[in-house]
Image (tube, rainbow, N blue to C red):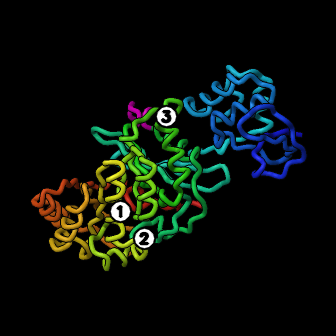
Amino acid sequence: MAFSFFLAAQYDCNSVISLGPVKKTLYLCTIVEKKIAIREQSLEQLQEQLVALNEPKFRSKQLFQWLWEKSCVDFNQMSNLSLGLREKLIENYFFREVEVESLQVAADKTIKSIFKLFDGEKIEGVLIPTSDRMTACVSSQVGCSLSCKFCATGYMDRKRNVYAEEIYDQVVLINRQALKNYGQGLTNIVFMGMGEPLLNYSQVLKAIDRITSEDGLNMSPRRITVSTAGIAKMIKKLGDDAVRFNLALSLHAANDEKRDKIMPINEQNSLEVLKDALLYFHGKTKNQITFEYIVFNNFNDTIEDAKELAVFCKQIPSKVNLIEYNPIEMADFQNAEEDKIDQFAAYLESQNISVTVRRSRGKDIDAACGQLAIKEK
């Protein structure tokens, strides 16, 4: 029978023990089937729990290093921990492990992975190699609830949020792919996979904290971009939390009528509301906003559309990424012609708007922007 330490609110406890002068009250719970997800615990929590298990406090630092810096998900491999401690860990804790179930390599060397989560749910992640970057695109939710009309994930039901350690492990696994296949580790991370990151706010920020920590992957937050469909109150919260990573907004139309048609979230988060939130965010963080604009054929690809976008951009410190659309079978949208995209970009440049045209990567394996959706059962 396993003995595990939990905060009282987590489980009904059979008995209470005194652990001396600790900051938080801990309880000794008799648990047979339930264990603690070990990477949900902070270093301070692990210190308290290991002391309660009659282990020296310094062991918690060693354990924490295995969990994050070394990305170890097997207690038996934690070689500098005593056998007795490893047995206690196995008895009382578990990992929410992420496995690469399958992967595909595109003609342009983009790699798409299907990740199987500990409960059997699946998400997708992408490694995007270019001449100057090695970028991981990660998922924050299993499915999505926003129903954007052009996005394959939007046609899936949202099943659950992805835990911080599952986000972290996507990065670790994609980094290993980068090193193995291209001899270079990740340079950038984008939260542009499945799901809306700001609807999984706490876990996304916790994952980024670990990714950027010296006790984790020690990556600069300036190399991380979180993309949102536009949830104004959460954008303001990012400002209040003084985040240091980059923020991108999936805009795709600079007037409410068009944006309402393709992004239902716009009905509660209009362009005026988003402008207010983005200015608030910039005022708090001084971070420039990136506007993502997929150019759809005969929908938002005219010079008039470009003029509307330029007017919107001039109100907010920003830059624009124009993105080629990648058609999906669930939607009728098509990519705009290349010369129209170039004309669109040229107009923005004439208005002193910083603009980059992002060409599709991984389209042949459904790994490109807007194509991520689990098809395997």
Q: Residues within 10 Å of mark 1 (few under 14, many from 20)?
A: some
Q: Please give the name of the residue rendered at 73% of the width and 33% of the height, measured from the top-left corner.
A: 48
Q: Residues within 10 Å of mark 3 (few under 14, many from 20)?
A: some
Give yes or no for residue 193 being in the magenta stretch. no
Identify the residue under disc 2: 148
Q: Please give the name of the residue rendered at 35% of the width and 62% of the height, measured from the top-left corner.
A: 250
Q: Is residue 127 above or below residue 336?
A: above
The disc, 2 or 3, on the residue closer to the chain's N-terminal end is 2
Give yes or no for residue 183 being in the magenta stretch. yes
Task: Provide residue 318's location: percent of width, then percent of height.
Answer: 25, 55
Report the quarter where the C terminus lies: bottom right
Task: Provide residue 35's location: percent of width, then percent of height.
Answer: 77, 44
- The reply, left or right, for residue 33 in relation to residue 172 is right
Farthest residue toward the front?
21
The local secondary structure at tag 1 comes to: strand
* Amino acid at dot 2: Cys
The disc, 1 or 3, on the residue closer to the chain's N-terminal end is 3
- The reply, left or right, for residue 354 in relation to residue 19 is left
* Amino acid at dot 1: Ser
The local secondary structure at tag 3 comes to: loop
Q: Are marks 2 and 3 in contact (CB under 8 Å)?
A: no
Identify the residue under disc 1: 250
What residue span does the magenta drawing correspond to?
A: 178-186
Identify the residue under disc 3: 213
The local secondary structure at tag 2 comes to: loop
Q: Of residues 81 and 279, which is closer to you in this image?
A: 279
Q: Of residues 321 and 17, which is closer to you in this image?
A: 17
Q: Please give the name of the residue rendered at 48% of the width and 64% of the height, measured from the top-left corner.
A: 153
